[in-house]
């Protein structure tokens, strides 16, 4: 009369449900752990690598600094360039303008002639000593204009005045004469010659 009902097999659904819960919990923990590790890696990289300026020149840490000597007229001195060393590590993340400003401040009597990622060439102007012009004055070319120079007793040259007379505005014969250098004994003679060139 009374039939015995079979009991529902709860074991299998409970095991499946437990497996799903464990699996989803493992996935959740794995994702969270991965995010934490990724944040840790990003934080570590930010600490280890200094932040680079947007417009950083990208100079190499092995960049060499060379000194090239030139004559006052801009011509090559004939001396071999001298290596001053490698670049300061503080310049690695600087812009081109900041690098030039650094060298201008560090070496006020030198200028950056060439700047690349692997080599910086500084130029330095050598003063001309001409004993044959000792205690005399000379009219010479100075950046496209006539310059009045004085030579001291040792023949060292110094600029007295840079005139506003452009060398290109003069006749060809006068240009050739000034390119060779017009040497006179007194300052008055030099100004007299300048008046002749200017008129």
Image (spheres, grey):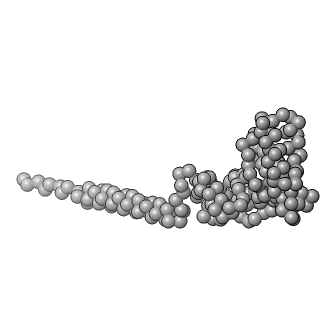
Q: Nearer the viewer, residue 142 or 110?
A: 142
Expressed as whole percent of the image width and height from the top left, the position of residue 49 reads 54, 62
> Where is residue 2, by image quadrant?
bottom left
User: In the rendered view, would you say 43 is above or below 195?
Assistant: below
As drawn, is 196 to the left or to the right of 51? right
Q: Is residue 73 visible?
A: no
Say which residue appears at 78% left-offset and 63% top-offset: 83
Q: Position of residue 162 (x, y in %)?
A: 73, 49
Looking at the picture, does residue 131 appear above or below residue 192?
below
Pick the front one: 29 or 139: 139
List x then y, in percent, for residue 13.
26, 56
User: At 77% across and 39% down in the image, what residue appears?
Assistant: 198
Identified at 70% across, 56% down, the residue is 111
Residue 156 percent across, percent down from the top left: 83, 61
Residue 28 is at least partly visible in this image = yes
Kindly give the residue lying farthest to the left in the view shown.
Answer: 1
The answer to whether 72 appears left or right of 54 in the picture is right
């Amino acid at each position: 009369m009374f039939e015995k009902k079979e009991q529902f097999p709860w074991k299998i659904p409970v095991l499946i449900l437990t497996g799903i819960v464990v699996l989803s919990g493992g996935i959740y923990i794995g994702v969270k752990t991965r995010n934490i590790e990724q944040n840790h890696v990003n934080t570590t990289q930010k600490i280890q690598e200094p932040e680079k300026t947007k417009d950083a020149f990208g100079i190499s840490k092995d960049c060499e600094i060379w000194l090239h000597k030139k004559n006052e007229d801009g011509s090559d001195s004939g001396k071999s360039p001298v290596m001053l060393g490698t670049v300061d590590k503080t310049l690695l993340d600087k812009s081109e303008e900041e690098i030039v400003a650094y060298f201008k401040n560090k070496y006020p009597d030198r200028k950056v002639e060439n700047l690349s990622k692997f080599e910086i060439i500084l130029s330095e102007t050598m003063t001309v000593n001409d004993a044959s012009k000792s205690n005399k004055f000379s009219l010479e070319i100075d950046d496209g204009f006539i310059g009045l120079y004085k030579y001291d007793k040792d023949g060292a040259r110094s600029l007295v005045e840079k005139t506003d007379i452009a060398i290109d505005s003069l006749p060809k014969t006068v240009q050739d004469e000034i390119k060779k250098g017009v040497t006179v004994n007194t300052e008055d003679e030099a100004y007299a010659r300048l008046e002749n060139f200017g008129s």
